Image (cartoon, rainbow, N blue to C red):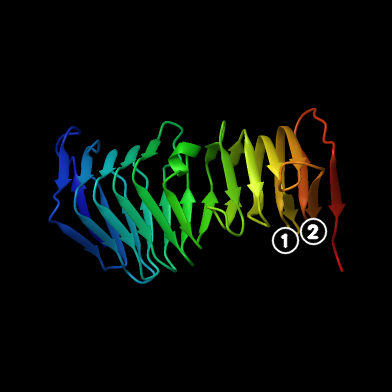
Amino acid sequence: AAYVAAGYQTPSEALTLGANLTLDQTGSYGLLGSGGYGGGTIVNDGTINAEASGGSFTINPTSFTNNGSITVSNGDTLYIQPQNFTNNGSITLESGSTAYLGATSTTAEWTNDGTVTVDSGATLHLIGDFTAAQLASVSDAGGTVYIDGTLDNTGATLAVGPGAPFAQVVLDGTIKGSTIVDHGSGIQFKGGTLDGVSYDGTLDLTAQSSSVFIAHGLTATGVNGSGPGTINLGQYSIIYFDDTQTIDNATITLGGYD
């Protein structure tokens, strides 16, 4: 393991990685974080490469700002989980690599004014609370995006499936509000929640043991936003309707063993 730490002596210390600096992680585990008393701030203006085959690299000072570039490759896994994270630069996930963006703490915050690119075969996990605006510069080039936290989609449209900005989404967190347009099996349901959502297209829960919670009602329609909706369940799949609500104008098909 190898470590780079800020804030070792006092919590107000800050470390800037300059524009001409390159940090390469080639060992099995690396850490860029706060040492000693914690509370450190790190700003990246340079280049960070997480490129250890089967390795992991964690960035978790109290505050981290990326103004430069971060690339995850060679099957490495990157964890960016500070208390406060701002991306003004670029983050690229190459095929076979994984990144976790955001922390699980209820007080943690992250913002994305830069770019995040998920190449084919790469995986991005989005954690914590975030909005549709923060997804605007996430580019899915054939990878998989996990919504592990809560996406506030109010006033926006999330398009998923073939030809959509997000080809494959896995939901084990929450999507709250507004409209999802599914062009064809764009979401895998892994026990997450649709909260007050209008769903245009087929809710496909035919994969074995799929499940989803419905909170505050569900409006289901055809993919063009009109006509009755379709909900398909497969073997051991479950759709839970939380509290008192009505589901109407849709066809629910209970599949199972062939």
Q: Would you say residue 131 is visible in this rendering?
A: no
Q: Is residue 127 visible?
A: yes
| Residue at position x 56%, y 36% in the image | 156
Q: Which residue is mark 1?
A: 207
Label 1's element?
Answer: loop
Report the residue at 22% width, 63% height from top: 24
Please state the horizontal and vertical placement of residue 103, each as a whole percent of the image: 42, 42
**Which residue is denoted by mark 2 in the rendering?**
234
Distance between mark 2 and mark 1 Cα atoms: 6 Å
Q: Are marks 2 and 1 in contact (CB under 8 Å)?
A: yes
166 or 170: nearer the viewer? 166
Task: Characterize the local packing of mark 1: few (<14), some (14-19) or many (20 or more) Cα atoms within 10 angstroms.
Answer: some
How far from the left and from the top, in percent, is residue 60?
31, 46
Q: Nearer the viewer, residue 204 or 164?
A: 164
Few, some or many residues within 10 Å of mark 2 (<14, 14–19, 20+): many
Question: At label 1, which amino acid type do we have?
Answer: Ala
Q: Residue at x 86, y 54 (%)?
A: 254
Q: Which of the marked residues, 2 or 1, is nearer the chain's N terminus?
A: 1
